[in-house]
Amino acid sequence: MAALGAGTIVGTAGCSSTGGSDGGGSGGNGTADEMPSVAGETLTLTTTTSTYDTGLLDEIHTDFEEMYGVTVDAVAQGTGAALETARNGDSDIVMVHARGLEDEFMRNGYGVNRRDLMFNDFVIVGPADDPAGIEGMGSATEALTTIAEAQAPFVSRGDNSGTHTKELNLWDAAGTDPGGDWYQETGTGMGEALNVANQQGAYTLSDRGTFISQRSEIDLTILVQGPIEGGPEILANPYGVMAVNPGVHENANYDLAMAYIGWITSPGVQNAISDYQVNGEQLFFPEAVSEDPDFQQYVPEGWSSDDADA
Amino acid sequence: MPLEPVAQLAPALLDAGAGPATSLLGASFREGYVGSIVAVSLYVSLTAVALSTLVSVPAAVAIGLTDFPGKGFVKSVVNTGMGFPSVVVGLVVLFAVSNQGPLGSLELIFTREAMIMSQFVLATPPITAISLAAVSGVDDGVRDAARVLGGTRVDVALVVIKEARYGIATAVLAGFGRAISEVGSVLIVGGNITSADGISKTRTLTTAIQLEARQGRYETAMVLGAVLVALVLTVNAVVVRFGDRGVTG
Amino acid sequence: MLRATNVSRSYGDEPVFRDLTIDVDAGEVVAVIGPSGVGKTTLLRTLALSLEPDEGTVTLDGTDPWAADEAERLALRRRVGMVFQEASLFDGTVARNVEYGLRVRRSWSERLASLVRLNGAADAVRESLDVVGLADKTDQPADSLSGGEAQRVSFARALAYEPDVLLLDEPSSDLDPRNTAVIEDAVGEASDRGIGVVVATHDMHQAERVADRVAVLLDDGITEVGPTEEIFEDPADERTRKFISGELVY
């Protein structure tokens, strides 16, 4: 309810003149013929390469651009870089899937109005003959430990991306420290990492989306499922979106960022997200619209108003 | 910028050629995509090289024709600049044009203009160094004659530039080659952006190749690479044809 | 007209010449003879108002360019021309070379308006090339000429803008007798037109042929200046006599 309400308010706020750059503009809510005062502006959105490479954003952004008469510049960087760019005020809005880093971003005051956006999951893939014997395991940590003990080749992205961060968290949770010839860090994007793993018959952790896009070109299969197909919750991959705090960066395009957040968390667009398919499969599962309240999406995980330093 | 109208017309024209070519090679792109990234590559690199030439050639002439203390040091610096990593230049320009940087108010981050800036920095050392070598190779007697027949320093410089024109052309081509085939700086300051319908804003051939490669689409990346090579060959051929001799300097 | 008084020049610590006095008048031909390396070229460059003397003064019609402002110095420098031992022609046609001196003396708008061939210069160009017998090569590329022809064009190039003084540094040292004769005739033509000519040469016979006066430059300065016949037949200074007779071995 709260989510829907907020979306509606922001939606209308975007339509009325908010006294942005052109002070004298249209007074109240624009009629169908008047363009909103944000028309002609550009929203700079930084996001991760894996999000961008799914093609989802190119698919849905046209709708937003036409609605407001604006341009969205989607910059695919890599989780760390996307957040750093936003921190510097070089982007207006950031969309990543690394909750810990998003929380830090909010805590340090750079981001406001975080919303849960959508989720997909990670899968552990590997060669069909499964030398370490992890197929069908219900525990991701157990699978990784098995791989480590078998010293089966494993490819890691090693680039501080969201996927890499998740992988490191898994090793941590498994209590295993990966290292040795069998563990290779490529420092590349997900697609390349899958290629490397394919060539070497190695295991790797991948987001489902990239794997689906490449499935036809490589010989790896999913050996440990993610929560979408009944696998362990720990492999969930939730996406969040945050506006850059105009209190920190005066020239952040806050109006447009909020309009975007309102738009992308609206039922219509959430449906479009769930309808988006690659190679005949759904990639993303919408999370923004829900009957039940979800206060945790707005604050760092575990935050409570009882905390002394609010 | 005066080249903007060209940059707007060019994509359609370029796509008319490049589109079918790339699909012949097995890679299919959205309509207008290839043309638009070629247009951005050319706009950014040609502008950067043109601006750099305006600065580098006079600098090379001034350095070459004058004796001053520290001349050897200046030459070393210029030559070192030739090998400067493009990604580092990108970072430096990023610091400058970022919201937090000294030029932040100009809002140049993620624009083609910022890319022109970084490629200007990259192209200047090769254009200067090779022009300097060409200028230094001009016979002293020619310089003397130009001066003693009543030429001012500018007159002598013009004579020298004319004598060294093939070497200078080589220098400009070298600068262009450096600019159009680099990926590190334009990726960092440009952001590799296209519009939702696939028309490039700051995506060049090189950053498009990088994008295909990171997604593991190596064949497609190679096709774009072939387009890039063809482009560089064409530019070289045009310049060489323009001068009646080869690049003998 | 052009007078150097007590001039000295050094390269760094090495003195080239000291305390020389020499002059040339309109229509005169003065030869400077002496062994190679004695400083003839440096002297000529000083007379060409290109090199500032370390000591002493050089004046053209009484004006010292080095005491004048830049504009005046340029104007004075432009009344003098010099031809070196090597032709050093510019890239382009013969005409383009010969008109260079005229071109640089025009305004920028005129120069930009006539990028290929300078307006109104055709007569001067043809005329200068006539003096050296190469008018038929006007439109040929400079690099298609033989060595002798190139040097003749170099002469025409210096003549074209009608300088008051012409300085020639070993102008025919590399040339065969025929081309040498052409150059020497051209020297005569120049002096007939009232141009003051200074020729530096190690060829004493050439000096005898072309010069009105001869200056003998030896290691310790100009030993003697005088009318040609006197110098060669009855030199006043013993060193001059020794040099001319070949007794001074360097």
Image: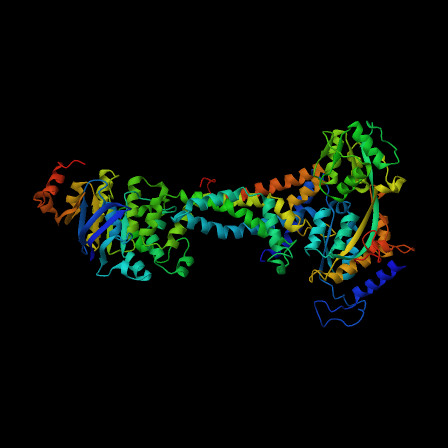
Tell which residue pokes out farthest to the right in this image.
Answer: A291
The image quadrant of residue A2 is bottom right
Q: Is residue B105 left or right of residue C31?
A: right
The front one of C177 and B98 is B98
The front one of A180 and B7 is A180
* Residue at the image point whose x is 33% and y is 61% from the top: C71
Image coordinates of residue A216 in percent, x first then y, are 80, 35
Image coordinates of residue C58 in percent, x first then y, are 23, 56
- Residue A129 shows up from this direction: yes
Coloration mode: rainbow
* Residue at the image point whose x is 76% and y is 36% from the top: A194
Q: Is residue A227 above or below residue A218?
A: below
Q: Is residue C162 left or right of residue A57?
A: left
Q: Is residue C186 left or right of residue A124?
A: left
Quarter of the figure that contains the N terminus of chain A: bottom right
Quarter of the figure that contains the C terminus of chain A: bottom right
Q: Is residue A144 above or below residue B94?
A: above
The front one of C78 and A155 is A155
- Residue B243 shows up from this direction: no
Image coordinates of residue C48 in percent, x first then y, are 26, 52
Report the number of discs.
0
Image coordinates of residue B183 in percent, x first then y, are 62, 44
